[in-house]
Image (cartoon, rainbow, N blue to C red):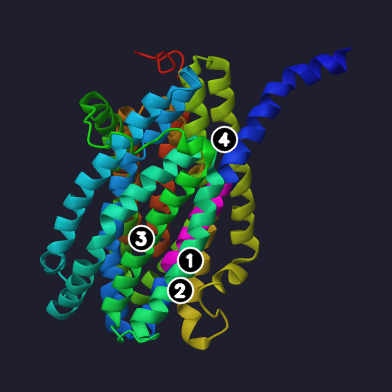
Amino acid sequence: MPNAAISTRDAPWRTELSATLALAWPLALANLLQMLVHAVDVIFVARLGERELAASALAIALFGLVMWAFSGLTGIVAALIAEELGRRRHAVREVRRSVRMGLWLAVATGLVGMAVCWFGEAIMLASGQTPALSARAGDFLRIIMWAMIPMVAASVLRNFVSALGRPIFATAITGLALGASLLFNWVFVFGNLGAPALGLEGSALASVCTSLFVLASYLVAIGRDRRLRRYRIFGNWWRAEWSRLREIVRVGSPVMVIIIAEAGLFSGAALLMGRIGESELAGHTVALQIAALAFQVPFGVGQAATIRVGYHFGAGDRAAIGRAGWLGIAVAAGFMCLTAAAMLFTPKLLLSIYVDPAAPANAAMVAFAISYMTMAAAFQLFDGVQAVAAGSLRGLQDTRVPMAIAIFSYWVPGYGTAIWLGFFTPLQGFGVWVGLAIGLVFAAGLLTWRWSKRDALGLTIRTA
C-alpha cells in the first residue's frame, strides 16, 4: 500500500517530465542544427579569403543581433498560445489572433531590421572598422537583409507548431534547411549548375534563399497537418487585433532587451579580448563556440518550459506550474553538469571540432582556449539554470523584472568584473571569463529566486 501511494504521488512529476522532454529534445536538436546552418556559411566564405570572412563575420554579427532580438519580441506568442490552450483546450480563435498579430509584427520589425542593414556600411565605419572591410560588410548586408522578414516570420510559426505539440516539425525543417544551405552556397558562392560565381554576395544570397525555403516549409507543414490546419492562422489575415498586438509588444519587448543585453555582454567580451591579444581573442572565440554549442540544449529546455508553464498558467494549476519549471531547471542543470565535465576532462577533443589542437601554429590559441574552458565548465550549470528560469518566468508572462535582472547581472557585476580583472590584474583573458561567469551566476541566482517566489509575488495569478 505505501508503494502504491508513492507511485500515485510521483505520477504527476513523471507525466510532466515526459511532456517536458517530448517538447525539449526536438527544440534542442533544432537549435543545434541551426548552429550547423550558420557553420555552413562560414565554411564556404572561409575559402574566399580572410577579408571576405572578416566582412561576413561583421555583417552576420549585426544581422544576427537584430534578427534574434526581433525573434525574441515575437516569440512571446508561444507563451500566449500555451496560456489559451490551458485556459480553453479548443481556443482556436484566440490562438489564431496571437499568431496573426505575431506575423504582423514580424513584417513590421523585419522592415526595421532591413533599414538597419541598409545602413550597415555606415554602422561599420562608426564602429571603427576600415573603409574596405566596411564596404564589403555593407554589400553583404544589403543582400542578406531580404532574409530578415522570412526569418522572423518563420520564428513565429516555429513557436506556433511547438506550442501546439509539433516541435518535431522545427527539427525536421531545420534539418532540411541545413541541406538547402549547403546546396545554395555551393551554387551561388562558387558558381555551379549554371549560376555565376558570386563569392561573398553569393553566400548572402544563399542565406536569403534558405530563409525563404524554411518559411515555405513551415507553411506546407502547417497546411498538411490536420491539427494545425484547423486553426486557419491565415484566415482574415488583414483583420487587426490591436489589443493582442499591444499585448505581444508589452510582454515581448523585455525579452528583446534581454537578448540584446546578453549578446552585448559576449560581444563586449570579444572587444576586451581583442585589446589583450590576438591569441587570447582566438582562444576566446573557439572556447565560446563550444560553450554556445552546449547552451543550445538548455535553451531548448527553456523554450519547452515556457510552453509547459504557460499551459498550466492558463489552466490556473499552480502545482503543475511549479512542477514544469523546477523539472526544466533540473533537466538543464543535469545536462550542463555533463558538458562541464567534458570541458574539464576532454578539452582537446572538444577543440578538435573547430581546430587542430596538435598543430604548432595553434599552440598559443589552444592553450588559452583550454584555460578559458575551465572557467566555462564552472559557469555551465549557471548558464543552463538562468536560461530555464527565464523561460519559466516567460511562461507566466513575467518579463519586465527578468529584463532588469539580466541588464544588472550582465553589465554591472559581469562586465564590471571582466574589465577589472582583465585590465587591472595579471589574470587578463582568464579574468574576462571570470567576469562572464559572475554575470551568469548573478542572473541564475536572481531569476531562480524570483521563480521560487512566484506565488508570493502574485505571478501565478492571471489578470484577465
**Marks 1,2: beta carbons within 8 A:** yes
Q: Nearer the viewer, mark 1 or mark 4?
A: 1
From the viewer's perspective, is residue 41 above or below residue 164? below
Disc number for residue 178: 1
Inspect the image, locate mark 4, and give the three-letter code of the amino acid beneath it.
Gly
Residue range highlighted in magenta? 26-38
Cα–Cα gap, marks 1 and 4: 28 Å
At label 3, counting other C-alpha atoms closer than 10 Å, the crowd grade (few under 14, some 14-19, many 20 or more) is many
Q: Which residue position holds label 2?
A: 182
Q: Taking 413 as reference, is 368 left or right? A: right
Inspect the image, locate mark 2, and give the three-letter code of the amino acid beneath it.
Leu
Secondary structure category for the residue under label 4: helix
In this orientation, which residue lies closer to the viewer: 230 or 408? 230
Q: Which residue position holds label 3?
A: 211
Q: Earlier in the sequence, mark 3 or mark 2?
A: 2
Q: Earlier in the sequence, mark 4 or mark 2?
A: 2
Q: Position of residue 40 (x, y in %)?
A: 44, 72
**Marks 3,4: beta carbons within 8 A:** no
Cα–Cα gap, marks 1 and 3: 11 Å
Cα–Cα gap, marks 1 and 2: 6 Å
Q: Which residue position holds label 4?
A: 328
Cα–Cα gap, marks 3 and 2: 13 Å
Q: Position of residue 335 (x, y in %)?
A: 62, 47
Secondary structure category for the residue under label 2: helix
